Image: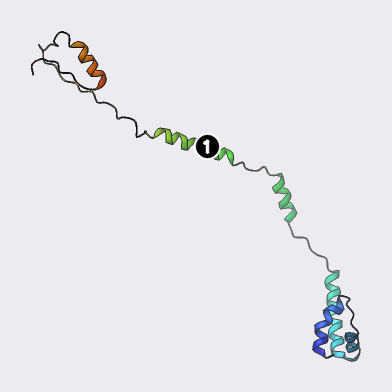
Amino acid sequence: MNCDACGERLIEWLDGVRAPEVEGHLAGCGSCRGLFETARSTAETLRSAPVPEPRGRWEDVLRRMDRPRRRWWPAAAAAAAVAAAGLLAIPRRDEAPPKRLRIEVVEAGDRIEPGKADAVMDSLEDGTVADLGGPR
């Protein structure tokens, strides 16, 4: 086994996977043995180091759990009510426009012929003006 092959298998050796060829190479090669001792010391230091807990993470989770949730449905109901009111305020196209009343001034002395009063009243209701039959 050469130094390159041993170096590739040192991590396995540190993890407990023992290979006789790596053990034989480490016994005879001071350079690889020094590399192994440095890697072993580093691995032990890392394993014994405390793992810090992220700051504030649990506090954030607990705070969010205690905080009341915002409800979306009141805002949606208000928006729907405003939209409905807006639609009701728009005039429908199928409705007829308001009728205009036509008012004519009757000169003094003009009179409605007898029997025409009912026709005049009916014409006022349907929007037309009846012929009063008087002079013009």
Question: Which three-letter amino acid code belongs to the residue tagged 1?
Answer: Ala
Kindly give the residue lying farthest to the top in the view shown.
114
Q: Residues within 10 Å of mark 1 (few under 14, many from 20)?
A: few
Q: Residue at x 48, y 36 (%)?
A: 82
| Res. 40 in view | no
Q: Position of residue 136 (x, y in %)?
A: 8, 19
Residue 6 placed where, x, y %? 83, 86
Residue at (22, 18) in percent of width and height: 123
The answer to whether residue 14 shows anywhere in this view is yes
Please state if 97 lies on the left or on the right of 20 as rendered: left
Can you tell which quarter of the image residue 22 is in? Answer: bottom right
Q: Is residue 50 left or right of residue 129?
A: right
- At 20% from the left and 14% from the top, the residue drawn is 119
Secondary structure at badge 1 equals helix
Q: Which residue is mark 1?
A: 78
Q: Is residue 45 left or right of residue 63?
A: right
Vertical placement of residue 75 versus 95, above or below: below
